[in-house]
């Protein structure tokens, strides 16, 4: 993630959109700094797609305003389109053309002359590790290769802001992480990324700032760490070999949660090093024989559920796979 910012790339203020009597966006607002990744999260029907459609000039808002690199999305739609690139959830590559021909087609559509177009195509094939597959049709590509080609096609004209709508949907974990690296490299080069995703780990890994959209309103906005701090539930879990040691610990840690079957004790904590040190000191002072401890802090799954009342749409093997508990033996 990139923390160096210079100016506002995307500015949204009081944005409203209704379809009939249904309010889809109810006056939302946010800013995205240049050269950063901004992720918009929310359950299905929250208004994410509508927000992207307005920002990419596909729809006009009913109220409020939005601008991309200083260009109003309604009054200066052509300037906005010259500034942005869009990669949708589903691949837009032409399967009848080779990878190289797909990129050349995009160069032609952007009115590159032949020399400049060939040079740009060669750069992108190299950048996205597609040189060896350049003469093959995308039908012979893996899912990850197709997504890399799709992203490369979006970048032919070197847009300053790109919108990635669920860019790793359907990819295996290795291909997903390869896409993450490609996105990080774009941001390191100064590109601004607006990301919508159903994979909360993806937002956690990539986004400098995250907004949670629910019912047409932004219910939380901040860094991943700031959002996690909104949710209570951090604790240190002590593990014991027998019930006697568990009972001794329970008497020493008033207000803790005891699990007799699992021989564990959960001690409330704010997740800080100081809080952990306090627990360890009390364990030592009370001569408690804890075999192991684990530290649990809320993750984005917890944040999403608490703020929207819904479980994340993508979990298990395709969603968040990394554990949030870190074990430390003593």
Image (cartoon, helix red, strand yellow):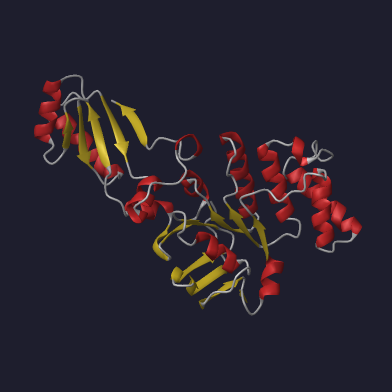
Q: Is residue 17 above or below residue 112?
A: below
The residue under the point 70% across, 49% down is 150
The residue lying at 84 percent from left, 39 percent from top is 135
- Image x and y of residue 140, in percent: 76, 35
| Numbered-mark total | 0
Q: Position of residue 98 (x, y in %)?
A: 82, 43
Please, is residue 239 above or below residue 109 in the view?
A: above
Would residue 287 be seen by someone viewing this image from the given angle? no
Image spot of residue 153 (x, y percent): 74, 52
Q: Identify whether 51 is placed above or below 102.
A: below
Task: Name the residue nearer the viewer: 105 or 224.
Answer: 105
Given the current orientation, which residue lies at the most extreme left position?
251
Q: Residue furthest top?
A: 242
**Residue 105 in the image: above or below residue 7:** above
Residue for point 32% across, 43% down:
297
Q: Is residue 241 visible?
A: yes
Residue at 11% in and 39% down: 254
x then y, percent, for residue 303: 36, 50
| Left or right placement of residue 301 versus residue 260 in this view | right
Q: 117 or 64, which lies in front?
A: 64
Q: Nearer the viewer, residue 47 or 122?
A: 47
């Amino acid at each position: 993630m990139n923390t160096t910012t210079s100016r506002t790339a995307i500015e949204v203020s009081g944005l409203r959109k209704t379809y009939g009597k249904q309010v889809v966006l109810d006056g939302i607002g946010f800013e995205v700094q240049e050269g950063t990744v901004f992720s918009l999260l929310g359950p299905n029907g929250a208004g994410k797609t509508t927000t992207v459609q307005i920002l990419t000039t596909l729809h006009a808002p009913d109220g409020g305003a939005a601008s991309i690199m200083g260009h109003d999305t309604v009054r200066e739609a052509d300037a906005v389109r010259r500034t942005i690139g869009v990669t949708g959830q589903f691949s837009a590559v032409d399967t009848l053309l080779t990878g190289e021909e797909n990129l050349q087609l995009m160069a032609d559509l952007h009115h590159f002359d032949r020399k400049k177009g060939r040079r740009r195509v060669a750069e992108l094939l190299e950048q996205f590790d597609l040189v060896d597959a350049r003469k093959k049709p995308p039908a012979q590509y893996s899912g990850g290769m197709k997504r890399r080609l799709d992203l490369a096609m979006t970048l032919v004209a070197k847009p300053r802001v790109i919108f990635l709508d669920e860019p790793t949907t359907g990819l295996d974990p290795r291909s997903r992480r390869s896409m993450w690296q490609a996105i990080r490299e774009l941001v390191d080069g100064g590109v601004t990324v607006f990301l919508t995703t159903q994979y909360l780990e993806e937002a956690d890994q990539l986004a400098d700032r995250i907004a949670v959209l629910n019912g047409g309103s932004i219910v939380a906005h901040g860094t991943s760490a700031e959002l996690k701090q909104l949710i209570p539930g951090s604790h240190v879990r002590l593990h014991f070999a027998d019930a006697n040691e568990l009972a001794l610990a329970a008497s020493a840690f008033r207000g803790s949660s005891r699990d007799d079957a699992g021989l564990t004790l959960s001690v409330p904590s704010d997740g800080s090093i100081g809080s952990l040190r306090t627990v360890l000191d009390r364990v030592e002072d009370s001569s408690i024989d804890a075999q192991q401890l684990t530290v649990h802090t809320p993750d984005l799954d917890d944040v999403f559920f608490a703020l929207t009342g819904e479980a994340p749409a993508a979990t298990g093997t395709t969603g968040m796979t990394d554990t949030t508990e870190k074990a430390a033996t003593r």
